[in-house]
Amino acid sequence: MKTSTKIIALGMLAMSCTFGTAVQAQKMAKEKTVMVGGAPMYPSKNIVENAVNSKDHTTLVAAVKAAGLVETLSSAGPFTVLAPTNAAFDKLPKGTVETLVKPENKAQLTTILTYHVLPGRFNAKMIWDAVKKGGGKASMKTVQGEELTFWTKGKDLYVRDHKGNDAKVTIADVNQSNGVIHVIDQVLMP
């Protein structure tokens, strides 16, 4: 191949890469995003791809990595994730997170994290409708196997864990390519 042909080919390749990146950027700019932790959450990205950009969910992301759940939460799903913020993890007794992310505690960490995941895509309206239909409460089975109970107070949606602790949904309906995230203010315990 002549040098001039190589230069033209490389130039065309560079232009196509630039054009492809520009098209992707335009597509993402048109998406209806929700801001979480100072970052836009793109519906075309999966749960993990979005979560890693939220400065409010660094502890959750580290825990998901330590539990080996990145591949699962990047898969097709769909999943509904109740995502505790860093502040929610900070409410746990001192040293809890540090202990849970140790390799020898992977099973316990996985149990806790999968308790925050529902199989399927459940937006806030679906959960509200289930609560209304259930006379003020709706129970839903988690990926971990136990149930969570949803309830409402005024305009707020809450979820109660197996131990009777309540978490408030602070940001609902953060759509993902493989499900939906609802940000919560407490860590749920099975």
Image: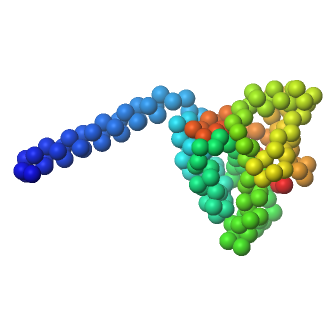
The picture places residue 53, in percent across and down from the top left corner, at 55, 48
Quadrant of residue 133 within the rendered picture: top right
| 175 w.r.t. 101: above or below | above
| 48 w.r.t. 64: above or below | above
Q: Residue at x 69, y 71 (%)?
A: 102
Q: Residue at x 83, y 54 (%)?
A: 189
Residue farthest to the bottom?
Answer: 104
| 9 w.r.t. 157: above or below | below
The picture places residue 19, in percent across and down from the top left corner, at 30, 36
Quadrant placement of the C terminus: bottom right
Q: Looking at the image, can residue 88 be seen?
A: no
The picture places residue 11, in percent across and down from the top left corner, at 18, 43
Q: In terms of depth relative to the viewer, which is nearer, 121 or 182?
A: 121
In screen coordinates, is 175 left or right of 145? left
In screen coordinates, is 184 left or right of 14? right
The picture places residue 22, in percent across and down from the top left corner, at 35, 35
Quadrant of residue 120 within the rendered picture: top right
Q: Residue at x 78, y 47 (%)?
A: 142
Q: In terms of depth relative to the viewer, which is nearer, 79 or 36?
A: 79
Quadrant of residue 91 within the rendered picture: bottom right
Q: Residue at x 73, y 62 (%)?
A: 109
In screen coordinates, is 145 left or right of 32? right
Q: Looking at the image, can residue 162 be seen?
A: yes
Q: In terms of depth relative to the viewer, which is nearer, 10 or 136?
A: 10
Q: How is the image coloured?
A: rainbow
| 126 w.r.t. 76: above or below | above
Q: Please state the total of marks drawn on the protein image.
A: 0
